[in-house]
Amino acid sequence: MDQDFETYLREKKIDPDLYRKGDQGQFDEFKTLFHQMHPNSFTSQKLFLINQIRRTYPLALEVKSDTESKTPKAKPRIQPRIKK
């Protein structure tokens, strides 16, 4: 599984650009470690730190379009079959 570190950060709702600018040393260290192990192992080992980083460098929320923000439609009612 070959995954880019910045894509991984976005999946974890961390802004990679803010993180790089805010803590270049830790960003480079984590990037190196990330490429040396499986993403799940990296997450397991750094989960507590990832949560702190997520709070410090949150990924900006995407604006939903009008069609996405509407409430979902009600499900149709299924009429029972009348036996004759």
Image: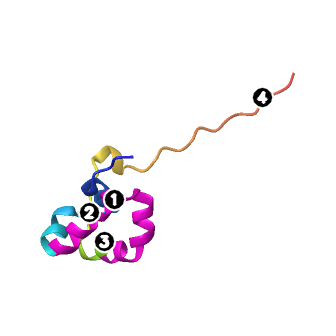
| Residue 70 image offset from top left, x and y in percent | 37, 49
Q: Which residue is farthest top?
A: 84
Q: Mark 1 is on which residue type?
A: Gln
Q: Which residue is drawn at 35% across and 62% down?
A: 12
| Residue 73 image offset from top left, x and y in percent | 48, 44
Q: Is residue 33 rendered magenta in the image?
A: yes
In this view of the protein, which residue sits in the foreground, 3 or 12? 3
Q: Which residue position holds label 3?
A: 54
Q: How crowded is mark 2: few (under 14 residues within 10 Å), some or many (20 or more)?
A: few
Residue range in magenta is 23-52
In this view of the protein, which residue sits in the foreground, 26 or 14? 26
Instruction: Give the alpha-carbon distance from disc 1 to disc 2, as whole Å.
Output: 7 Å
Q: Mark 2 is on which residue type?
A: Thr
Label 1 or label 3, whichever comes before in sequence order? 1
The answer to which quarter of the image holds residue 19 is bottom left
Q: Residue at x 34, y 57 (%)?
A: 11
Instruction: Give the alpha-carbon distance from disc 2 to disc 4, as whole Å.
Output: 63 Å
Front of the two marks 4 and 3: 3
CB under 8 Å between callouts 1 and 2?
Answer: yes
Q: Which residue position holds label 4?
A: 81
Residue 29 as seen in the image, left or right of residue 48: left
CB under 8 Å between callouts 2 and 3?
Answer: no
Instruction: Give the alpha-carbon distance from disc 2 to disc 3, as whole Å.
Output: 19 Å
Q: Which residue position holds label 2?
A: 32
Q: Mark 4 is on which residue type?
A: Arg
Above/below status of 5 relative to 81: below
Label 2 or label 4, whichever comes before in sequence order? 2
